[in-house]
Image: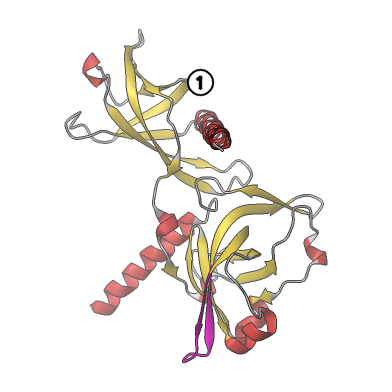
């Protein structure tokens, strides 16, 4: 058993390492700017930015144009690096990410540029903890939502009618209650629940297609996600059932109109976090106006 655990740990570490190296390639190829943050006892300089110019299996080299010079006192300092890149498959989607590392060496190049040589980070994570923020959603900001029992990779969507479709079922008691970057909560009238999803149990898998818009009536982005049903709560007083889903993978439709799934990166659906962040910001503004 211990050998199996060790194999699982090694596989997971190898997957994380591959993900880190792929992401470093994206940072370099997209020439993404990195914002560096240090502890207060390291430096009082703010807004230090850098560019990734090289990396290998052990180190990452950054060119720090914001510094005119640097001494060996930086060596050993911990640093948090924040950046934004475009998703490889869907270029219109942006991801805000971060990693933590430590400076192994400082180089003053003949050109005068300062290079920081960092340890290869162990992991890259979402820069904003948007995945844990659940936001009440104006239905007009989710102009379309469809639900199926889990769709396998390769399925032709046109041949598979959904269980629920907001276009027709909103009038029958379907409502999107809230969203996060890694899940959503639906409310269903109990009559609709008994008809479409009777006797649902936690742990069952479902697939969603939905559209998200920053503001009602503005252009919307499309998302395909696989999910697992985590919570079922029937409210007899309101005659409705709440269903809580956690996203576990995301997909896209290929040229043959077949659905292809891929694992979530950084535990959230790519590109969805910016909508959740904006919706949450709008709610705070609305509360402020209401209180005034």
Query: Which residue shows up at 44% across the image and 56% down it?
Result: 131
Q: Horizontal and vertical percent for residue 142?
A: 55, 70
Q: Is residue 223 above or below residue 127?
A: below
Residue 42: x and y, percent?
20, 28
Residue that numbered label 1 is attached to:
57
Magenta stretch prevailing secondary structure: strand
Q: Is residue 243 magenta?
A: yes
Q: Which region is colored magenta?
A: 231-244
Crowding at mark 1 (Cα within 10 Å: few <14, some 14-19, many 20+):
few
Q: Where's residue 193, x and y in %?
A: 62, 83
202 relative to 29, above or below: below
Where is residue 28? Give x, y as percent: 51, 28
- Viewed as shown, does residue 263 lie left or right of 54? right
Give the SS element for disc 1: loop
Can you see residue 221?
no
Left or right, 71 with respect to 50, comes to left
**Residue placed farthest to the front in the image?**
1
Q: Which residue is situated farthest in the top direction here?
A: 110
User: In the rendered picture of this protein, how many numbered marks are placed on residues?
Assistant: 1
**Figure quadrant of the C terminus:** bottom left
Is 131 situated above or below 42? Answer: below
**Nearest to the observer: residue 115 or residue 160:** 160
Name the residue: 59% across, 85% down: 173
**Residue 62 quadrant:** top left
From this view, report whether residue 235 is shown above or below residue 288: below
Residue 125: name its quadrant: top left
What's the residue at 33%, 15% (across, down)? 105
Judge whether residue 164 is colored magenta.
no
């Amino acid at each position: 058993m211990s050998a199996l655990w060790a194999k699982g740990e090694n596989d997971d570490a190898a997957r994380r390492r591959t993900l880190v190296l792929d992401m470093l390639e994206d940072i370099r190829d997209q020439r993404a700017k990195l914002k560096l943050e240090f502890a207060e006892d390291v430096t009082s300089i703010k807004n230090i930015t850098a560019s990734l110019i090289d990396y290998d299996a052990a180190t990452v080299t950054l060119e720090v144009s914001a510094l005119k010079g640097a001494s060996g006192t930086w060596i050993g300092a911990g640093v948090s690096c924040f950046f934004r890149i475009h998703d490889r498959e869907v270029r219109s989607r942006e991801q805000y990410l971060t990693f933590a590392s430590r400076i192994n060496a400082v180089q003053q190049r003949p050109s005068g540029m300062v290079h920081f040589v960092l340890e290869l980070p162990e992991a890259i994570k979402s820069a904003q903890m948007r995945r844990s923020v659940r936001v009440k959603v104006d239905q007009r900001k989710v102009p379309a939502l469809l639900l199926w029992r889990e769709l396998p990779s390769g399925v032709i969507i046109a041949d598979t009618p959904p269980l629920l479709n907001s276009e027709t079922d909103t009038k029958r008691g379907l409502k999107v209650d809230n969203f996060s970057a890694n899940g959503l909560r639906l409310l269903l009238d109990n009559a609709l629940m008994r008809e479409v999803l009777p006797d649902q149990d936690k742990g069952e898998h479902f697939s969603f297609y939905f559209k998200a818009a920053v503001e009602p009536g503005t252009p919307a982005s499309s998302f395909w996600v696989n999910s697992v049903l985590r919570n079922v709560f029937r409210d007899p007083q309101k005659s409705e059932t709440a269903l809580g889903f956690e996203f576990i993978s995301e997909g896209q439709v290929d040229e043959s109109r077949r659905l292809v799934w891929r694992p979530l990166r950084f535990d959230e659906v790519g590109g969805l976090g910016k909508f959740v962040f904006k919706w949450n910001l709008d709610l705070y503004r609305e509360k402020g106006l209401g209180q005034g």
